[in-house]
Structures are given as structure tokens and as C-alpha cells.
Amino acid sequence: MSTYDDFIVAVKDIHRLQALQGHLGWDRETIMPEKGAAARADMLSWLAKEAHARLIAPSLGVMLDALETTEGLDEDQQANVSEMRRAYDKAVKLPEQFVADYAHCKSEAMMVWQKAREASDFSVFEPHLERLISMTKEKIAYLDVEGTPYDALLDEFEVGMKVEDYDPLFAGLRQRLVPLLDSIMAAKVNTPDPQWPEGLNFPIDAQTDFCTKVSEAMGFDFQAGRMDASTHPFSAGLWPGDTRFTTRYDLSEPFSCLYGVMHETGHALYEQGLGTEHAYTPRGAAVSLGVHESQSRFWENQIGRTPAFWEVALPWFKEHFPDAPSWDPATLNRIANKVSTGFVRVEADEVTYNLHVMLRYEIEKQLFNGDLAVKDLPHAWNTMFQEWFGVEVPNDRLGCLQDIHWSMGAFGYFPTYTLGNLYAAQLLESMAEDLGDIDALVSSGDWSPLLQWLRPKIHAQGSKMSPSKLIEHATGSEPSPEPFLRYVESKYGRLYDL
Amino acid sequence: MSTYDDFIVAVKDIHRLQALQGHLGWDRETIMPEKGAAARADMLSWLAKEAHARLIAPSLGVMLDALETTEGLDEDQQANVSEMRRAYDKAVKLPEQFVADYAHCKSEAMMVWQKAREASDFSVFEPHLERLISMTKEKIAYLDVEGTPYDALLDEFEVGMKVEDYDPLFAGLRQRLVPLLDSIMAAKVNTPDPQWPEGLNFPIDAQTDFCTKVSEAMGFDFQAGRMDASTHPFSAGLWPGDTRFTTRYDLSEPFSCLYGVMHETGHALYEQGLGTEHAYTPRGAAVSLGVHESQSRFWENQIGRTPAFWEVALPWFKEHFPDAPSWDPATLNRIANKVSTGFVRVEADEVTYNLHVMLRYEIEKQLFNGDLAVKDLPHAWNTMFQEWFGVEVPNDRLGCLQDIHWSMGAFGYFPTYTLGNLYAAQLLESMAEDLGDIDALVSSGDWSPLLQWLRPKIHAQGSKMSPSKLIEHATGSEPSPEPFLRYVESKYGRLYDL
């Protein structure tokens, strides 16, 4: 066997152990009986330890060194070498004791965060967040990469993206989103959004059937995947040929389930499109959180929240929910696109969503690159929220305690959500150049050209190139916020008669 | 750390890898999407390879050698050492190439068996069975243990049991079961068994709820386990705190589901009772197939197929199946205990079941210790069946092709089913000595004393002692067929007025 063959065996072993963690994680969130929790946590940490031990094996370092000076590797092989180099370097730079302490700190912080959030009391979480940030700074020092401290974190979630990239991007977005939001809020005073009437009941079986139909129409292959229920919806490409996503149900309205399913199906289609020939290697995996989010947001918002979608889905809706009001596609679409200055990111519309993200970005930046003290975090949050949304945050639960991410040590994660929105809009514009009128295509009911466009340009590429190169490869242009701004201003201008 | 501590870390790693196989196997049989099959097979064989590599690690051999001469190990520790010694010796004696070839031969044979069974044509399966038996003989030679060749196989499934144990046991059973069967068949001519009327419909949801109620009444903890559906019902103690069993549904009658659930719940209660302090070690695992089967048969037959059970279960039955005939407990019990000379082991009643097992035992013995040629197997099967059951086997599908076991290379497995029946009857007698009238206890509706009796005597013992020592420990007597014969003759004598 060549060195590359040996290398791939080692790489696949690591990824198999990670895939096992993924499967047990899926099982835990969906069907595990509650008394299985302790053994599951123990097993997941055993698998993580096993995978880590193989990742930091000196033999892997030796192979990487050799392969980096080997001539004649093809693009796929090069992608595997460079992705594994990145993972290896990061892993070996962190002392094992630090990794264990950090994991412990995170799991403790997560439990405390849940309590603090319930009690809506930041002071409960504060010492844990303090310690988590101090350990994260320690980690940044170990990693010893170029750029600002926060850059090291941003790079973990979207390779190549730094503060110097995000700062102008976000400033530009804010400059146009804040005035747009103001105009919409003013317009809403005269023409209020339609609402779900109270007292309706949307049975779980009917929601499941309706959403399954939509997911199938998007192209999800249910012979190679499943839909289940969980508290927090998610999607996971567990195994080659076996991608699973989840949803949740609100009996009083069906959109939480529907758009959750469209979102997760978007993620799941990406996983189903990765192809199996590169299974258990970086080349065969999704390239980044930003690109993943572009797939979910594309289907959820740019396809799902349109009158064209509702022209197709209305008969299905009526069939499954015969007791719902007999609304037309335009009204259902208005409900699906209601803009509000709500406090919660995960419930936000397309206009305000990125403002929620930027707020978190600014705070993270000040925590790691500036001098924001943890104790001043709620004040910083609430001040910025008031400035951008024009509303006062009533409590920590609806403010800086709402997201789980910080309690997991996932600093630098949030900006990838916005990248997803931007990428999605850029993909839509480029798709329209190739396929013509997308609305017409969507209202025809045959959405397969959309998926067939995404498959070779995004899905099948795996991690062959960097996220921004991938977007450029797919659309012919470097990533830019302009398509998103054009999209959002045009869409909401029409919706609210601005 | 002491050698024993190091040893336990290695032992647990092996068992964790096996538990992962168990989990992925459960998932495959219950919920895996069909296109996940190829990757699942690949992953299961990777896990088997990883576990095997750790089992044959020379370092394990060194630790075993050291521990076998270490003073002061307690009983639990000694059990782990001796069980791992057994597994280690067997694993290291088999050359790796042989293990791979044998696995390949088995998986090919299983696929061909399915086709042969469908076509009811033994000749299709014959060359594969021929090769499987020849490789199994090769394996016996590698194992190089004392006794006859067939003894080596019997020992794999129930430690310590040999031809010299089974031969007199089975001869004694046959001597009394064949005449009992004859009397019953004669009695049936005048008083036919009651039947399920045709055209009834037992909805899946109602069957699920009814069987869940029975399983809960038996003591299964649904917070530490699940019930799902699968083609072939099974039970698996996947993880500490997470034991899962399955059932299947026949819409035309509910007993296939009910007694399947009682059987699998019996297995599952054993798993739930093993305790978690010895998790991932042999000491914490069920001791043998025979003892496992005693737990399933105890609940299914000795508790479930009684008038006392139906006194309790009839109101539940009526509640869930309001359209069923309004039978009394005695009639339902008659249906549940119908004796017949059917051809299929898995559908057999308590009188004929062990005859089905013995037939397979005699054939296996002649294949490995005698000179029965594979091509003569159907003839040998059919001749023996005619002699014992008085009926002619119409085809191979209902004859020697009915069971999956041989296609999996599981020669020597069948006798453990009979051991289970014998152990169960012996446990019931002993339980009655301690708890008094078991019928009265069952008809009271509170079955917890039964489980509380089994827990310390059987379940919590794990693999602390050999199967026969465990039965002796629990009942005060060595394993014997007499309790079973007393039980079956008395029960069926009453049922058929003999």
C-alpha cells in the first residue's frame, strides 16, 4: 500500500468513530429511553477519546508530512491531506489535560446555562461563562494562529473568514437592514399581518403527512433517510445512504413544523448529495456550516416562503387540514413572512435574522478582541438591541441567555448563519440565470431542476475547495452580500407595499 | 493501576465495541432506511474487526496469564478472568484468514439459504451447507478441545454441556413426550380446540397498547427501554439503562404479538436486572442462551399461557379489542395452548417444541460426530419427523430449510432452547416452594413477587457462575428434566382431559 492508502485507512477510522458518535447522538435526541442517559454520555465520551487518540497519533503526523511533499496527488487527495492537517495541528497543539478540563467546563456550563435561562438570571451563568471564556482564550493561545484572537475562533467554523472580512460585510448589511426594518414596522401600523385564528387544532399525524409530502417534493429520498421528532430539530448525515432529520410539532399552528422540515430537508439534501465514494473522509463531508446553512435557508425561505410555493402546497394543505381557514396562497405567504421585532433569533424573519446574528458577533468580538467584561454583557446586549430593533429587552431569558451556543463554548459560530443567508441568495440569483424564472419553476410543482442544479455545483463537491471558492465555483462570483440585499429589499418591499 | 484494573479497561473496550454492534444491529432491524444497508454491513464488520483485534492482543494474553496466578481476586473478578480466558483462547486459536473466510462463507450461505427456502429446494443450499460444515469441522480442529467434535460446538452456546449430558436428557424427554403427544392428538379428535373466527381485525395500535400493558405488568421498565416492531422479534440489552425488544403484528389474531411480547419481555427483564455496576464485562452479562431462554419461556408459557393470567388480562383484552368474541379466560387459555403436530418449530406448543429441538440435535450430532452426509439430510429429517410426530413433511421449506441457524453456522445452538424450557419449569417449582400458590399470585394481578424472586437468584448473578451452577444456586437442585415433565404432563393432562 502507498502512504496515501495507509493515510486513508487511518482517516476513515477516525471518521467512523465520529459517525458512531453522530448515530448515538441522533438516537439520544429522538428515541433513547431516559434512563439510558448516563451510559450514553459515558459512551459518547469514550468514542470521542478514541477518535482523539487516533487523530493525535504520531504516525498520522508522519504520513501528513510525507504526503505534503508527495507529487501527483489529485485534487480530492489534496483536499483530504489539507483538511486532516488542519484537524491534526489543532488537536496536537492542545494538551490532553486541557482538552479534558475544557470539556468538563463546557458540560458544567451547559447545565448551569439551562438553569440560568429558566430563572432568567444571567448572574447564575456569569462565573461559568467567565471561566469558559478564559479557557477559550487559553485555547486560542495554544492554537497560536495568525490574526486576532477572535479570528482563531471564526476560522474554526468557517475556514478563511476573519474579522477583517466580517466587519465590512456586517456594517454594509446593517446599513440597509435597519432602515428596511423601520419602514416595515411603520407600514405594519396600517396593514397588520394576518394571524392564525385561536383555537385551531392541527393534529400531529396530519402535520407529519403534509410535511413528508413537501420534503418528498423537495427531493428527499425517504428510502435513504428518515424524519422523526425531537425537542430541537436537526439534521444528520449519519451514514452513507442513511440521512436523518427531525422536526417538532405545535398543535396550534403548522408552520413551525413545515418550515422546520423545509429547513432540515435542505440540510439533509446536501448530505444525501455528498455521494458515497468519499465516505468517512473530509473530501466526502460538507465543507462548512455557512454552506450547510445556505442549503437549509434556500429551501426554507427562498423557495418555501413564496406565493409560488403556496400555489403548489395549498391543495396539500387543504387536504391535510380541512378545518383551517380557506386562505389563498398570498395570505398563507403573508403569514409565513411576517416581520417582527421579536427578541428571539430562532423565531426571526429574514429581515431581522441577520441583525440578531450581528449583535452576537459584535459581543463576541468585544469579549475576545476588546475589553468587554462578562459582567457587562447583558447591558451591552440590551443597548445594541434597543438601538437596532427599537425595542427594550425585558429580561435575560429573551436576551443574552436565549442561545445554547456560548454554554457549549461555540464562540464564533453565529456568523455562519448569516453567511448561509448570503450564500443562499447568491445561489438563487445564479440559478435564475441558468434556469430562468424560478417562481415559474416552483409554481409548476416540479422542483427537481432546483436540486439538480445544486447537486453538482454544491453537494457533490464536498470539501474539495474552501467555502468561498465553492460559492465562486457555483455562481461565477466571489461571495457578496449584494444578492441578499437585493432579494430581501425586493421581497419585503412587495410584501409590505414599501 | 493494578494489572486487574488494566485488564478491565481492555475488557470494557472490547465490550463497548460489541455493544456498538448491538446498537447498530437493533437499528438495522427496526428503523434503518433500506438504502443504509450496505454502509451498515460495512460498519458492523469494521466494529467486529476492531473488537477482534483487541481480543487477540498479546497484551491481553499477558494480563490473563498474570491474573490467573494472582491471589486475592474476588468471585466477580475471577468470573471476568475465566470468561475472558475462554474468549481469548478461542480467538487466538483461529487464524485471521480463517476467520475472514468463515465469515464470508456464512454471509454467502445465509443469502443462498433465503433463496433456497423461498424455492423450498434443499439442493440449492446443499453445496453451501456442505462447505459451512467442512469449515466448521476445520474450526473444531483449530479449537482442539476435549470431547467429541460436536461437544466443541455445544460448549460454545452452553458452557459445560456435552453430548454425554444431552443424550440421556433428550432420550428421557422423548420417552414421555411422544406418548403424551399421541394421547393429546387422540383426545383432539373428539374435542377440537377453539379457533379465532375468520374476518376479525385487531388494529396495530390496540395490539401495541394491550401488549405494552402486559409488559408493564410483568415489570418491564419503559423508562429504561423500548418496544418496537421488526420482522423477527428479538430482545437486546443494548446499554446500561437501555434495553429494547421488538414484536410483530398479525392483524387477524393478537396472540402472535402478545406471546411474542411476553417472550421478549422475559429476555428483556433479565437484561434490565443484570445491574450496571459490572457493565461491559462478562460478569455483568447474561450467562448463557439456555438461562436467557428460561426467562423468556417462563413468562411466555408458565405465566402467560394459564387461566390465572387470563383472569387478569381478560378485562384488558376486552377493553382493547371490543369486537372480539366474548370468550371466558378458560377458552382464551385453550386457544393459547393448542397442541398440534405442525411442522414449524417457532410455532410449536410446549409439548412438541422440544421434539423439534431434539430432531435438530440428532441431525447435528450425526453431521459432526457420525457419518450423515449433507445430501442425505432432508431424508434423515423427514424420517425422524414421521416417527416422532406421525406426520409426513411435505417439503423442505416446512422441513430442514425452516430455520436460519445453520446458514449462520450456528451448529449446537438449538439444544439451548430445550434447556431454557427445563430450567424455566425447575425455577417455577422452586418459586412455588418459596412463594406458595403461583396461580393465586398470578390471578391477583400483582406479579412483582415473581420478578423479585428472579432478580437476585438469576438476573443479578450475571455470569458469576456456570449455567448449571446458577440453576442449582437458584433452586437448590442440579438441573433436571423432571420438573418440566411434571409440569407439561399435568398442564396438558388437565387441558385435554387425559
Image (spheres, coloured by chain):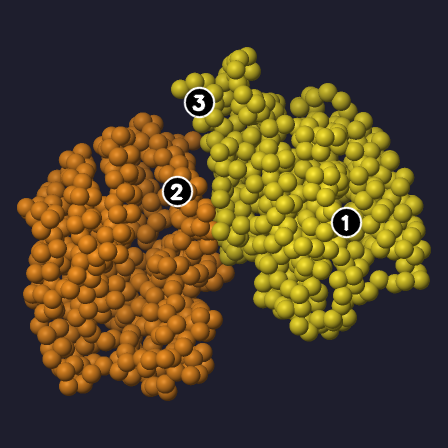
Chain colours: A orange, B yellow
Separation of disc 1 and disc 3 at Cα? 45 Å
Q: A374 and A92: which one is in front?
A: A374
Quadrant of the drawing holding the N terminus of chain B = top left
Mark 2 crowd level (few <14, some 14–19, many ≥20, 10 Å Cα): few
Q: Residue at x 89, y 47 (%)?
A: B180
Q: Residue at x 65, y 55 (%)?
A: B445
**Residue at the spot of label 3:** B6
The three-letter code of the residue at mark 3 reads: Asp
To which chain does the residue with label 2 belong?
A
The residue mark sitting in front, 1 or 2, is 2
Q: Is residue A410 left or right of residue B44?
A: left
Separation of disc 2 and disc 3 at Cα? 22 Å
Q: Is residue A493 visible?
A: yes
Which dot marks residue B345? 1
Q: Is residue A394 above or below residue A445?
A: above
Q: B7 and B285: which one is in front?
A: B285
Q: Residue at x 26, y 35 (%)?
A: A101
Which dot marks residue B247? none
The three-letter code of the residue at mark 1 reads: Arg
**Residue at the spot of label 2:** A41
The three-letter code of the residue at mark 2 reads: Ala
Residue A34's spot in the image, x, y percent? 44, 50
Q: Is residue B183 above or below residue A390?
A: above
Task: Report helix, strand or loop for mark 3.
Answer: helix
Task: Report helix, strand or loop for mark 2.
Answer: helix
To which chain does the residue with label 3 belong?
B
